[in-house]
Amino acid sequence: MRPLKNPKYIQIALYVFLTAISIILFTLLCMNLDQVKMVWDKVVGVIAPFIYGFIIAYLVNPIMLRFEKYVLRFPEKSRIGAKLKRPLGVTLGMIVFMLILSVVVGLVFPQVATSFKDLQSKITDYVTAAQNLADSFVREFPLFNGQYETLSEFLDVNEISSDIKTVISNFSNLLGYAADYAIEYGKQFVIEVKNVLIGVIAAVYFLLAKERLISKSKKAAAAFLSRRHYVNLVNLLRFTNKTVGGFIYGKIIDSIIIGCLTFILMSIFKMPFTLLISVIVGVTNVIPYFGPFIGAIPSAFIVFIADPGMTLWFILMIFLIQQLDGNVIGPKILGDSTGMTSLAVLVSITIAGGFFGFTGMILGVPAAAVLCVLFRQKTDNILRHKNASTESADYYDNLPVRNFDNEPIFIRKDETIPEEYDLPPEDTAQS
């Protein structure tokens, strides 16, 4: 007699088997992290050109779409227009992207490199001038009553461990380490340039076949997923594209404006290393929350060792620029693209930056925004299933109500508690 198959037990056995396999794989991964990292680096190195190609295509895509919408306006029934619209849009988009890249690489980078070399060659003179200014301040400041001749004497007498001269001198060593690092990894830079060039070619193919690639991906997803999961996946990807894309494009435009504004104001007030500092401020401004501090601290230090008298004015200028950016420019460009609180932004940047470095600090906020939306949707669905309120305001004052079987009963804020339910003593005491 053949045994009867019970689908319930088969499903339980399958879950147990998959769970055991997952535990074993996770244990093996933890025990061989070095090998896993080596394999991961190898895989990333192989597909790096396509990663660069996807990033370039993602950045060029909005430029291409605007050309197609506002410039390449062929008649609707034109066959030639239908065939040429996408290739011309890709060509014009890539030309604009390359022009922007050429301006940065051809004009900005050489000037930044020149400023960096000038800073390195004159670091000793700047250190001496800063030290002399600090010494004169210590001698002439009324609070010290002429007790000290130099800043070092003041620091030693008062047992202050920080030695400004040593700190500034170490900055020169840091410049040397940076130069050695650049030389040591010059080969890797050449490899990355090769990957970027291949990525440009891949980006062109991605843009030309964008709709076809998307439709095939959706077709495969529809084949292997249920209708509900397919629709949820498409909606999730659309929301992710809107959130991440809007945040990245907005941050890039915002950072360019801040960098240009910094350059203009520093040029007007004749501050040192104008272009170098403007690039630092603009690039670091891409990082939310921490970006202004990351850029302002080394920039203020560079201004201090080159022209100490300008340091306070520079700090004041950066403070005013960041206030303008935070209250006017940023909200106008970005709007409420993430919908996250300041605490959530801080946590997401800290965690993502700790795991993924500079890239994580940029992408951590939009990625966290997507996760927050998914969690909120899941929470709301569970509450609706329990016939409970999904409004956060309803949970500020109300406490959980339990019946005599100790089962939670959710009451809306505008509802009255039924007489058959009593509040637990501890909840009554808290209220």
Image: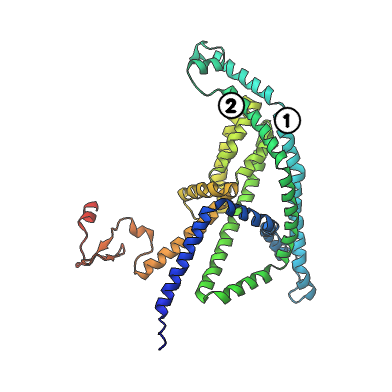
- SS of the residue under disc 2: helix
**Spot occupied by residue 10 in the image (x, y as percentages of width and height):** 43, 77
Is 12 positioned to the left or the right of 60 in the image? left
Which circle marks residue 167 in the picture? 2
**Spot occupied by residue 199 in the image (x, y as percentages of width and height):** 72, 57
- Closest to the observer: 337 or 43? 43
Q: Amino acid at mark 1?
A: Asp
Is 244 positioned to the left or the right of 210 in the image? left
Q: Amino acid at mark 2?
A: Val
Instruction: Measure the C-alpha gap from mark 1 to mark 2.
Output: 20 Å
Q: Is any atom of residue 59 visible in this view?
A: no
Q: What residue do we see at 71% from left, 68% from top?
A: 209
Which circle marks residue 431 in the picture? none
The residue pinned by badge 1 equals: 118
**Spot occupied by residue 231 in the image (x, y as percentages of width and height):** 53, 72
First reached walking from the N terminus: tag 1 or tag 2:
1
- SS of the residue under disc 1: helix
Q: What residue do we see at 26% from left, 66% from top?
A: 407
**From the viewer's perspective, is the residue at label 1 or at label 2 nearer?**
2
Kindly give the residue lying farthest to the top in the view shown.
146
- 275 versus 63 height, above or below: above
User: Quarter holding the N terminus?
Assistant: bottom left
